[in-house]
Image (spheres, coloured by chain):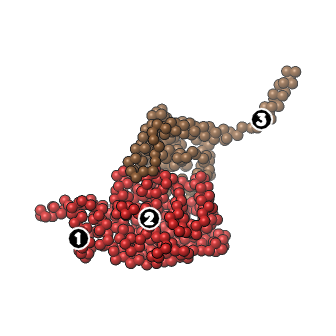
Amino acid sequence: MTVHYICVLLLALVAQPPVNPDAKVLSDFKDRVDQYVEVRKKADDAAPPLKKTDDPADIRMAQQGLAERIRAARAGAKRGDIFTPEITAHFRRLLRPEAREPGTKALIKDDNPGAIPFKVNAQYPEKEPLSTVPPNVLASLPKLPKDIEYRFVDKHLILRDARANLIIDFIPNAIS
Amino acid sequence: MQSGQRLEAARPPSHLRCFGEPRRRSHGTLASAARKARATRVMPALALFVTAIAVVGAQDITLPNAADSLKVAIIGDSGTGSSSQNRVAERLMAVRQKFPYEFVLMMGDNLYGGSSPADFAKKFENPYKPLLDSGLKFYATLGNHDNPNERYYKGFNMKGERYYTFKPKGNVRFFSLDSNYMDKPQLEWLEKELAASGSDWKICFFHHPIYSSGGTHGSDMQLREQLEPLFLKYGVDAVFSGHEHFYERIKPQKGIYYFISGGAAKLREGDVERSELTAKAFDTGYHFMLVEFGKDTLHFQVISDQAKTVDSGSLPRFSDEDKKKFATTPSAR
């Protein structure tokens, strides 16, 4: 009887569909981004939402207020919180063929602010341009929730909160 | 000496001082009004407006200026707060006396170097104050130098979105796209909106040109790969962009007219590498565009900061049958 159970168990294990390691990494990435979105939602709820306004000071205040609340909630945030080594390796694999496409690197370089100082949980340097992210690169990367975006600073891929103008995390030398 | 000092003290901020004495001398009453407004420092914007009318009122308009058409002005890469921006703004204001455009399209890079309240004032609200005060609307698209949160600014009429569509009147619909970040949701939105649009004219505008003879940037091929199939499928008629700091009218591509207008405050002199794409280019001065949409014709006039018409013409709308034929021809580079 015991042997029978062991056989059934073994058969069940063998019959299980194989776990796609990429899917696991992507699922992990999604979970981490979702956790960030939860933090932002709480930060959002703590103040009136930003509405269309005639006064640019309102926009600035809302952006900075949101950034401050998120920064406080993520006080210990550091590089790798979202882009873990596994996720980083996977993203580099996704980016490699796209970066080889003719014109892609040139486009990334075109509007790129270049080698500027930046860090996790800090504002994206306000006076700097935002790099264009070519559509083929965007199509290759996992989809993000609204107002969270990929951008490049030099060769580094950053994850940016567009509404708070905040750097969430980054992958150094994501494209070579 | 004392008199000179008084005059210096009475001058408005440098970004509002764009015209020299000789020009003012040649326009009696209006010029005097402008001088008075400047000297009192009470209403610098009024001074700018009056000066603009006095100096550039004589601009020839080559457009039909028909009563029932849609009239639009276009500026690109305008947000520097420099004397060049102000000079173009003055021309823009002056020309409205003769060609009453109903709104202004902005091709992106609306605010260079930051988006603080002071930036909004210096690079948008002050230069165009008389136009804004008159109730004229500006519709912006985002450039690579723009903070995406500009979408919340009412003066840019972006509906709080990075990309949006509007139909001001009659038979023309506009689609403003965020070419900095052409992701799947935006492409899906564009397809849905284009498909639902029953307008005769479908006009797209966004920052990065997909056809360009610019030496510095050139055609954005990746963007073209994504957008052109949709433009062809749903019959887009004309596309306006900026980014390149010059003017270029592209030869029609597969039944679509392409214009680049990115020189309303920035200039990259000599950057046009005239190619098989080029129908007409202007890279030796600042400029803005006037466009008039008739029933089946797009009329345009491009005016430099020196009040010279650098390009003008009338372009017939391609029929749906023609567009279907064009859709199968290969693209130029």
Give, as a three-letter code, the residue at label 2: Val
Against A9, residue A145 (above or below) is: below
Discs 3 and 1 lie in a common subunit: no
| Left or right of A160, for residue B235 | right
- CA gap between label 3 and label 1 equals 88 Å
Q: Chain of mark 3?
A: A
- CA gap between label 1 and label 2 equals 29 Å
Chain A representation colour: brown
Per the image, the residue denoted by label 1 is B32
Q: Position of residue A76 (x, y in %)?
A: 48, 32
| Local SS, label 3 | loop
Query: Based on the displayed image, in which of its 4 quarters is residue B42 positioned?
Result: bottom left
Q: Position of residue B276 (x, y in %)?
A: 54, 73
| Left or right of B150, for residue A135 | right
- CA gap between label 3 and label 2 equals 61 Å
Chain B representation colour: red
Q: Chain of mark 2?
A: B
